[in-house]
Image (cartoon, rainbow, N blue to C red):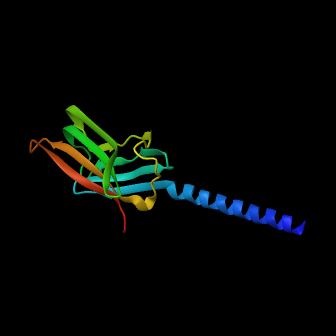
Amino acid sequence: MGSRRSLYLLLFILLLSGCKDSSEEIQQSHIQFALDGESEHWEIESYELLYDGKRYEAGNGKITMKNTDEYVSDFFSISIQVVIDGESEKIQSQSVSGGDMDIGEHQIGTINGNRTDSNEAIHKEDIDQIYATVIWRDNEEKKDVKETIILYKSST
């Protein structure tokens, strides 16, 4: 009877240790970023990226042109990219055009989605970089201007 009890205890411990590993894997694939960054002309504040292994939510930030309260242009575009294991993947983009509009401050909306290109979960250490590309029309120079804002860069 004592050996049977020992066997059940051993099986119970193995079962618990298996659950722990599974729980750790789930936690490792859960990623949460609150990001800020700036370039010569632009500043992004409070951009959020949440990922639970299958679904992601991105956005909620604000982009502001530095050193001005208002900037009138007829074109503005922002694209957020994530570099995973050396490959860039666009996760969000917006653009507006037409007429004279103030692009000095812009709220970055929120998007939700499923990661469908791979069955493998992404872990924080897989992410090399997160960056934004901003393009806007400089009406004085009559040309489009492009800048990159680094929001996250891996330390490895």
Q: Is residue 63 above or below residue 99?
A: below
Quarter of the rendering containing residue 96: top left
Q: Where is residue 131 shown, x and y percent of the image?
A: 31, 54
Q: Which residue is more in the foreground, 149 or 98?
A: 149
Name the quadrant of the N terminus: bottom right
Q: Where is residue 81 shown, x and y percent of the image?
A: 32, 50
Residue drawn 35% across the image and 58% down it: 85
Q: In this view, does 128 lie above or below 60?
A: below
Q: Is residue 67 visible?
A: no
Tally of numbered tags:
0
Q: In the image, 142: left or right of 129?
A: left
**Residue occupying the far left of the picture:** 141
Residue drawn 20% across the image and 43% down it: 136
Name the quadrant of the C terminus: bottom left
Q: Can residue 68 be seen in this view?
A: yes
Q: In the image, 17: left or right of 94?
A: right
Q: In the image, 40: left or right of 22?
A: left
Residue drawn 56% across the image and 55% down it: 26
Q: Which residue is more in the foreground, 55 or 132?
A: 55
Q: In the image, 22: left or right of 57?
A: right
Q: Where is residue 52 shown, x and y percent of the image?
A: 51, 49
Q: Which residue is more in the foreground, 116 or 101?
A: 116
Q: Which residue is more in the foreground, 92 or 52?
A: 52
Residue drawn 43% across the image and 62% down it: 125
